[in-house]
Image (cartoon, helix red, strand yellow):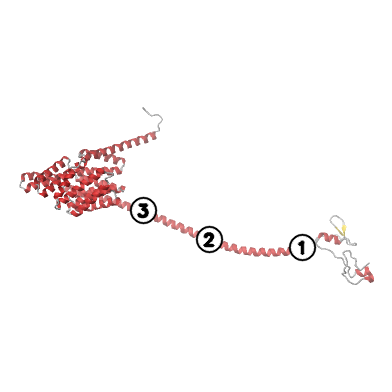
């Protein structure tokens, strides 16, 4: 049925999303199936499923899942004694996990790489890697990662005959696994079994083989089938070593034979190789040369498939390439840091320059403002002085205006009676005219010329007199 009206873009995005979801689901399913086959010892089937998961995760860009798939593929190759492809997968997983900053994954893969070198008997190369694995796991503080790294380091100490260091590493490993027992009981039990095998080897090689036997048998009596699949061949191998140390030839031969069968049935070539070496040596020691020769032939075949010069050279090439890749990544990181620092310095210089320019501008502005402020103050003082002067002058003018009111223009006056004509045409006395148009007032008196004419002998001779406004002398009746 065709959907009508769907936008092409929307339909395309939906199809891509569904395809991606389907591919991711298939990749996760293949990964789970591969791990199930690995735990059951079906390594070929495990490799097929894990390889498909790896391809899908890589195509999808799921780098975390891809790193995990690579590590699991390495584990399968390691169990089969195929150390070269195991190491290649481990190194690829390590590179991805370093890029992702996956501390737990880094610790686990480093421990796996160290264990691979240990089986290859490259102890000096394994030691710094395992020490880094332990240090990384300790920084993380994750019990299972700490337990696994310490166990592998303990086994390296065993191979180097450093038994006290080995015992200490196993004890610490067991404690870390025990700390995870509440949330991961199966992993905690497997951790105990792994370290029990290591302690059994230490006991055997330090003269305590009688104590090692019951401990190793306890591992073989485990009811955890997954742990037994991985550990059974090793447990019979170390039990045979304990019986041989005790002088129990029959029990030792039986244990070594069981170890070979278990290892061959699960393609664990390293365990089979070491059990065959023990069988060959025991048969040779009692003169059974024909049987011993058959075992030695099997040993040589296995040893050539596990340890060969060509593989060593290829591993060295892989390590060199890994170091080159890491150096290139580090150079890229440093170059990016230098570029970032250069940009930061340029930005800081620009900020300093801008801040300096702003500071200079602000300083100049403040100086100008200060100058204007001082000039304004000076002008204010001058203006205040001028205003004060003007106020004084105004007061003086006001006083003058109060005292003087000026008449101006042409005043028509009678030539006979001396009366003045106003604007309306009326004639009025000079005194009245002037008093109405100014602030002056009149006080009448008799001048020295008119006094004798008016008063005759009664004139006192005073030109001013003290008469009233009407001109009459108060003494005149």
Q: Indicate which disc, 2 or 3, sits on the residue closer to the N terminus.
A: 3
Helix, strand or loop for disc 2: helix
Asked where in the image residue 262 lies, by quadrant, the reply is top left
Between residues 224 and 375, which one lies in front from this camera angle?
Answer: 224
Percent x, y of residue 460: 91, 72
Q: Marks 2 and 3: which is nearer the front?
A: 2
Q: Label 3: which residue?
A: 339
The reply to whether residue 110 is in sight is: no
Helix, strand or loop for disc 3: helix
State yes or no: discs 1 and 3 in contact (Cβ < 8 Å). no
Label 2 Cα crowd, 10 Å radius (few <14 / some 14-19 / many 20+): few
The reply to whether residue 349 is in sight is: yes
Residue ID at (7%, 47%)? 284
Q: Marks 2 and 1: which is nearer the front?
A: 1
Residue ID at (46%, 57%)? 355
Q: Marks 1 and 3: which is nearer the front?
A: 1
- C-alpha span from label 2 to label 3: 40 Å
Residue 190 versus residue 335 in the image, above or below: above
Q: Label 1: which residue?
A: 402
Percent x, y of residue 150: 23, 50
Residue 247 is left or right of residue 218, and the answer is: left
Residue 201 is left or right of residue 455, and the answer is: left
Q: Label 2: which residue?
A: 366
State yes or no: discs 2 and 3 in contact (Cβ < 8 Å). no
- C-alpha span from label 2 to label 1: 52 Å
Asked where in the image residue 9 lies, by quadrant, the reply is top left
Q: Indicate which disc, 2 or 1, sits on the residue closer to the N terminus.
A: 2
Asked where in the image residue 408 lies, by quadrant, the reply is bottom right
Q: Which mark is residue 328?
A: none
Helix, strand or loop for disc 1: helix
């Amino acid at each position: 049925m065709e959907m009508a009206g769907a936008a092409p873009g929307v339909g395309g995005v939906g199809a891509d999303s569904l395809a991606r979801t389907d591919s991711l689901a298939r990749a996760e399913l293949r990964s789970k199936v591969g791990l199930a086959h690995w735990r059951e010892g079906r390594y070929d089937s495990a490799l097929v499923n894990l390889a498909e998961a790896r391809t899908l995760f890589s195509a999808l860009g799921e780098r975390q899942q891809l790193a995990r798939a690579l590590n699991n593929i390495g584990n399968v190759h390691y169990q089969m004694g195929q150390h070269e492809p195991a190491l290649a997968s481990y190194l690829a997983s390590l590179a991805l996990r370093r890029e992702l900053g996956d501390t737990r994954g880094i610790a686990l893969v480093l421990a796996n790489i160290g264990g691979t070198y240990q089986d290859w008997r490259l102890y000096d190369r394994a030691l710094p890697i395992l020490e880094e694995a332990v240090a990384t796991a300790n920084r993380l503080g994750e019990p299972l990662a700490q337990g696994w790294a310490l166990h592998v380091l303990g086994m390296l100490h065993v191979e180097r005959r450093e038994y006290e260091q080995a015992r200490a590493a196993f004890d610490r490993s067991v404690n870390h696994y025990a700390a995870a027992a509440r949330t991961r009981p199966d992993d905690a039990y497997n951790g105990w079994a792994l370290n029990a095998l290591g302690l059994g080897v230490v006991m055997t090689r330090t003269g305590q083989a009688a104590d090692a036997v019951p401990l190793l048998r306890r591992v073989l009596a485990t009811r955890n089938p997954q742990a037994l699949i991985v550990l059974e061949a090793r447990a019979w191998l170390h039990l045979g070593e304990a019986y041989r140390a005790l002088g129990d030839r029959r029990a030792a031969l039986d244990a070594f034979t069981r170890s070979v069968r278990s290892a061959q049935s699960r393609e664990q070539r390293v365990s089979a190789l070491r059990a065959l070496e023990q069988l060959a040596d025991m048969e040779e020691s009692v003169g059974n040369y024909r049987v011993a020769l058959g075992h030695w032939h099997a040993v040589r075949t296995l040893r050539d498939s596990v340890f060969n010069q060509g593989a060593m050279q290829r591993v060295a090439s892989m390590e060199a390439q890994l170091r080159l890749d890491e150096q290139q990544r580090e150079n890229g990181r440093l170059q990016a840091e230098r570029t970032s620092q250069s940009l930061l310095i340029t930005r800081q210089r620009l900020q300093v320059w801008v801040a300096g320019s702003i500071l200079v501008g602000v300083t100049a502005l403040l100086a100008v403002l200060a100058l204007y402020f001082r000039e304004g103050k000076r002008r204010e003082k001058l203006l205040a002085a001028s205003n004060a002067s003007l106020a004084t002058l105004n007061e003086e003018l006001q006083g003058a205006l109060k005292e003087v009111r000026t008449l101006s223009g042409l005043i028509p006056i009678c030539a006979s009676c001396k009366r003045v004509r106003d604007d309306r045409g009326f004639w009025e006395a000079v005194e009245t005219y002037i008093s109405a148009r100014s602030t002056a007032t009149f006080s009448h008196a008799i001048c020295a010329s008119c006094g004798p004419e008016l008063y005759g002998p009664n004139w006192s001779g005073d030109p001013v007199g003290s008469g009233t406004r009407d001109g009459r002398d108060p003494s005149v009746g």
